[in-house]
Image: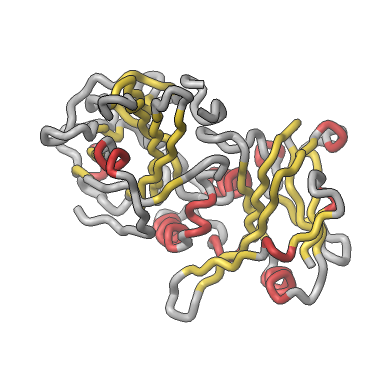
Amino acid sequence: MNRALFTALALAIPTFASADVPEIVRRNAPVFVSRKDQIANPNTDRILGVGYSIATAIDGTQTIRYTTFFSDEDSMHSTEGTDHQMARYGRRLDIEWTYEVRIDPQSGKGHHRRYHCDVALGVGHRTCSFSGKFYRDTDRPILYVNARHNIFGDRPKFPYGTASGRRTVIDPSFEIPYPKSRDMIPIENPEMLRTSDEELAREGKLSSPSTEYAYLRIRGTLVGFPHLSLIAPDGTVYQNGKHPNDTLREMGLDLWRRESVVGIELPESVRFALKSGVASFRLGISGALAFAPPLAKITLDDVGLYLVDRAPNGTYVTTDLSSRIRCSDPKDLGTCSVD
């Protein structure tokens, strides 16, 4: 098994992708019960999809981890919070690791079931052992969304959990294999970003749409807390976020810990130049503090760059510019350019 995966082991809704999902993944996928406040407002923090990742141990034991994609996170009340999400993770929608189960290689039965829960009173993050109920004589656990930052319980808990919430039965449709970042799923399925943008706009939490950014994907190892930069031919530096807490802090949050995505806001003229290839842009890193750049380092395994645009029919579409990236040293982001 690749030990990087899990630290412990080592109503109709929109569907944005489909996949040839293994039956064992479908059989153990969670069923969700919405929060108390979503009974009156079902169009907030909607579940957009569920992803899955599989790690296999030497003895054949598989661990399946499920990841849920929400249109928003109502615990964030301002554009400051959602802009911070865009800078660090390349999206404003909420992504949460949800549930994991080990599958016995002989019997095919699940055991060692755990889920993403709160510390207390809907605050914080930790891992809990599942001891709740299953959905209609299946192996699918019932999880209650118990907090406004979309973490779960195997029973409804104060302040937001309720047994009367809307029940969502959804099959996983996105595989997130090693070493892929979960943050790539919305970029590959940009209608997720559109759905999130529309909700944030209704709630006054959208400073600029997802179509005004470039998305830089980094795979490798990270030292320090850098900003990632796109440098124009005239020397203008565009970076992910404006504040020290917008820096990249870790690779591959809550999953493989090998790849991350950041969002870099760009003027339309720069996006046009980047997309059309009329100029060469350099990639690089800078520190959050004046003394930080020498201490911040990324050792690259791979790098990618993407733009999201609004099509004439209103849908969002993604353009992959990764093939245009050239690096004189494939391990050093600072030697890379987009030609």
244 relative position to 331: left or right: left
188 relative position to 62: left or right: right
Q: Nearer the viewer, residue 236 or 300?
A: 300
266 relative position to 23: left or right: right
Query: Taking 189 as reference, is 4 above or below it?
Result: above
- In the rendered image, the quadrant that contains the C terminus is bottom right
Q: Place residue 214 in its image quadrant.
A: bottom right
Q: Residue at x 40, y 45 (%)?
A: 51
Q: Residue furthest bottom?
A: 312
Q: Where does residue 314 sit, x and y in percent of width and height?
A: 44, 75
Q: Place residue 138 in its image quadrant.
A: top left
Q: Nearer the viewer, residue 37 or 322?
A: 322
Q: Residue at x 26, y 47 (%)?
A: 170
Q: Place residue 144 in its image quadrant.
A: top left
Q: Where does residue 319 sit, x and y in percent of width and height?
A: 59, 68
* Residue 198 visible in the picture: no
Query: Taking 162 as reference, is 262 above or below it?
Result: below
The colour scheme of the drawn protein is secondary structure
* Residue 194 visible in the picture: yes
Q: Residue at x 51, y 21 (%)?
A: 10
Q: Where does residue 139 sit, x and y in percent of width and height?
A: 21, 32
Q: Residue at x 76, y 52 (%)?
A: 229
Q: Nearer the viewer, residue 230 or 322?
A: 322
Query: Taking 78 as reference, is 310 above or below it?
Result: below
Q: Where does residue 326 sit, x and y in percent of width and height?
A: 79, 59
